[in-house]
């Protein structure tokens, strides 16, 4: 409504308050002063009221969104009338020796006007919310809010106030016993017993619940798993609730999202020394190979924020390289960067790029990583993962790069497939190359496990299979894997890069391994479905080259702690550089001549003696060796 309409309505309410005051006074034993007529006294009061409305802007707010601030303004307004009436009363008495108002008259008007003005706003606000909730209430999810603290209460108030919210909080649930029988912001406080599963079963019927809201960073991963398991057992959905990191004037709505499997992995948040990384990268010329892939593109995003002198993002995947190009252009408009569409196995092309830019640091993330694919196309896997690494490493040394950081994988540890063996051979070459006399470049290797959300990761695969209605495919009932987010992995790569003195393999603490079958079952439940009933899970058998569990250390390796609790350093036995070069020269010749895959893999097994194939056509080579 226009402000003048609100002002007119407030004046009508003020006149109504005057009427109530007159009626009460006529039925009371008090006799008003007859110095002025009743209409003159009413005129003075209303005049003071209009003046107070103008001073305190009581008409400026939107009534249906009235808050405590609006109530405060009204309180000041009616208090102004009371004080003004008393002041006028005594000034008139000082001049004429007569009074105009009884104090009781002014107090009654103050009470009646405050009640009417405040009640009007409450009625309008509550009616507005009632109508909207009545219209949309059947579409809202009825939820319990887990936890009772200042932040949880504030977020819940925001949800209730947001008429477009899809959620309707009905109670707070906490393991605290102190708030029993209390209400907070009008919602009951429920104390959970030692058995949350039984509590939810009871409250589900009482409140007709659809789910539970959890404040994302207020609950430990262990407790979150317990809550989720209890909720899923009772057919309830679970949602994360949090405020956006940055709020604009137009965006004050809380974020509520279905809880994801990533939220339930028992891993503590990783912290890195951003100051040290910034000092290391700022003002440097940096190359990222494989810069359009999952790891490489995230490295590019992180490094761009540290203000390098120049950033080169190189990959041979055109579409994904275009995407990271657009991202950097839009997100970091002042960044000095270029993207290069190039193949790391093309020596002349790589030499030209190194010669042009004289890189300070190289992050080598280019690799083929899909185990079954490389098992069927071993030439390309070895050409890129092993020979490509050698090419980039030799160019880094030739052009005196300060540092070469290689991204490796836990599949290189006691490899059971060609992909892992090709990465292991690359690790061995980099360590051997470090031992060359007068080597100025520091060669550093980082080794970690599966990355959540990366291309080919099992979690996106399971999500797609669930969306299609199943089945969800798991290769073995007992297969387990380590997991880490892309961002965490890349942050640790940057951190490890600041530590290395050359020749080390840095191993990341991946937390607890996860049973893939358990993950599949949990993901189906999180979608509100039942495993083996709504969505079937099929055990397909181990894929080519796949093993039940991955390792982070090879027999004979020792892992020592570093100053970062999530990074260990492994010192390997020495490898003779010339022997490595001769072996790789031979393998490269065999690949270029198109020799049989079996002969190439046999040569790779000689180079990497711990390479024992599993579920592969190359198993016979191991039997021959034995």
Image (tube, rainbow, N blue to C red):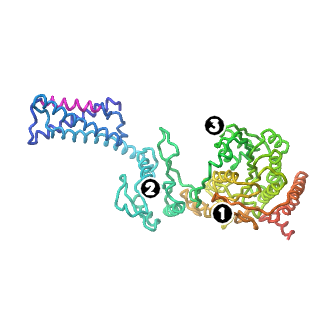
Residue that label 1 marks = 538
Work out whether mark 3 precedes mark 2 in sequence or the reverse, and give the earlier one. 2
Q: Position of residue 232 (x, y in %)?
A: 51, 61
Residue 471 seen anywhere in this rendered image of the structure: no
Asked if marks 3 and 2 touch (Cβ < 8 Å), the reply is no
**Within 10 Å of the Cα at label 2, are there few (<14), some (14-19), or many (20+) other Cα atoms?**
many
Q: Secondary structure at mark 3?
A: helix
Residue 99 seen anywhere in this rendered image of the structure: yes
Residue under the point 37% across and 57% down: 188
Label 3 to label 1: alpha-carbon separation: 43 Å
**Image quadrant occupied by the C terminus:** bottom right
Residue that label 3 marks = 330
Along the viewing direction, whichever of 554 and 540 lies nearer the viewer: 554
**Which is more foreground, mark 3 or mark 1?**
3
The answer to whether residue 489 is left or right of residue 64 is: right
Magenta-colored segment: predominant secondary structure: helix
Extent of the magenta region: 37-53
Work out whether mark 2 precedes mark 1 in sequence or the reverse, and give the earlier one. 2
Label 3 to label 2: alpha-carbon separation: 38 Å
Residue that label 2 marks = 145
Q: Position of residue 276 (x, y in %)?
A: 64, 49
Q: Secondary structure at mark 1?
A: strand
Residue under the point 44% across and 64% down: 201
Q: Position of residue 21 (x, y in %)?
A: 17, 38
Label 2 to label 1: alpha-carbon separation: 36 Å
């Amino acid at each position: 409504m226009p402000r003048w309409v609100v002002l007119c309505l407030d004046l009508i309410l003020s006149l109504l308050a005057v009427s109530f005051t007159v009626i009460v006074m006529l039925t009371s034993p008090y006799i008003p002063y007859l110095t002025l007529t009743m209409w003159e006294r009413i005129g003075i009061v209303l005049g003071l009221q209009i003046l107070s409305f103008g001073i305190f802007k009581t008409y400026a707010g939107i009534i249906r969104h009235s808050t405590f601030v609006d109530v405060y303004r009204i309180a000041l307004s009616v208090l102004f009338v009371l004080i003004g009436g008393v002041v006028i009363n005594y000034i008139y008495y000082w001049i004429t020796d007569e009074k105009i108002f009884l104090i009781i008259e002014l107090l009654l008007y103050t009470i009646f006007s405050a009640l009417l003005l405040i009640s009007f706003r409450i009625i309008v606000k509550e009616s507005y919310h009632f109508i909207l909730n009545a219209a949309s209430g059947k579409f809202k999810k009825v939820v319990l809010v887990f936890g009772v603290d200042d932040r949880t209460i504030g977020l819940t108030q925001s949800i209730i106030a947001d008429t477009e919210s899809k959620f309707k909080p009905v109670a707070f649930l906490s393991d605290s016993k102190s708030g029993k029988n209390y209400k907070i912001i009008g919602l009951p406080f429920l104390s959970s017993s030692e058995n949350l599963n039984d509590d939810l079963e009871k409250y589900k019927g009482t409140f007709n619940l659809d789910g539970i809201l959890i404040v994302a960073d207020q609950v430990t991963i262990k407790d979150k798993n317990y809550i989720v398991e209890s909720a899923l057992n009772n057919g309830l959905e679970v949602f994360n609730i949090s405020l956006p990191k940055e709020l604009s004037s137009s965006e004050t709505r809380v974020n509520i999202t279905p809880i994801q499997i990533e939220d339930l992995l028992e891993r503590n948040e990783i912290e890195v020394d951003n100051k040290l990384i910034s000092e290391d990268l700022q003002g440097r010329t940096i190359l990222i190979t494989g810069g359009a892939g999952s790891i490489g593109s995230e490295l590019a995003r992180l490094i761009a924020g540290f203000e390098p002198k120049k950033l080169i993002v190189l990959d041979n995947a055109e579409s994904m390289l275009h995407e990271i190009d657009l991202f950097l252009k839009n997100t970091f408009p002042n960044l000095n960067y270029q993207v290069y569409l190039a193949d790391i196995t093309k020596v002349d092309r790589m030499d030209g790029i190194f010669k042009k830019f004289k890189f300070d640091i190289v992050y080598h993330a280019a690799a083929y990583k899909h185990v079954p694919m490389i098992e069927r196309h071993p030439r390309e896997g070895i050409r890129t993962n092993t020979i490509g690494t050698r090419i980039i490493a030799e160019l880094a040394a030739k052009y005196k790069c300060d540092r070469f950081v290689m991204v490796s994988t836990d599949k290189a540890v006691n490899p059971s497939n060609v992909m892992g063996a090709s990465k292991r051979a690359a690790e061995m070459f980099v360590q051997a190359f470090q031992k060359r006399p007068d080597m100025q470049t520091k060669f550093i290797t980082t080794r970690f496990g599966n990355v959540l959300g990366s291309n080919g990761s099992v979690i996106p695969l399971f999500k797609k299979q669930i969306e299609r209605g199943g089945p969800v495919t798991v290769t073995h009932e007992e297969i387990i894997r380590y997991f880490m987010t892309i961002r965490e992995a890349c942050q640790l790569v940057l951190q490890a890069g600041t530590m290395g003195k050359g020749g080390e393999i840095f191993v990341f603490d991946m937390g607890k391994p996860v049973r893939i079958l358990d993950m599949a079952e949990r993901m189906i439940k999180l979608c509100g479905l039942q495993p083996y009933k709504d969505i079937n899970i099929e055990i397909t058998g181990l894929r080519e080259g796949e093993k039940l569990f991955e390792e982070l250390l090879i027999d004979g390796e020792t892992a020592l702690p570093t100053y970062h609790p999530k990074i260990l350093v492994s010192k390997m036995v020495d490898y003779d550089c010339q022997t490595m070069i001769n072996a790789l020269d031979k393998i490269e010749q065999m690949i270029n001549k198109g020799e049989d895959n079996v002969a190439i893999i046999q040569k790779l097994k000689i180079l990497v003696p711990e390479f024992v194939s599993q579920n592969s056509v190359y198993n016979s080579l191991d039997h021959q060796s034995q």
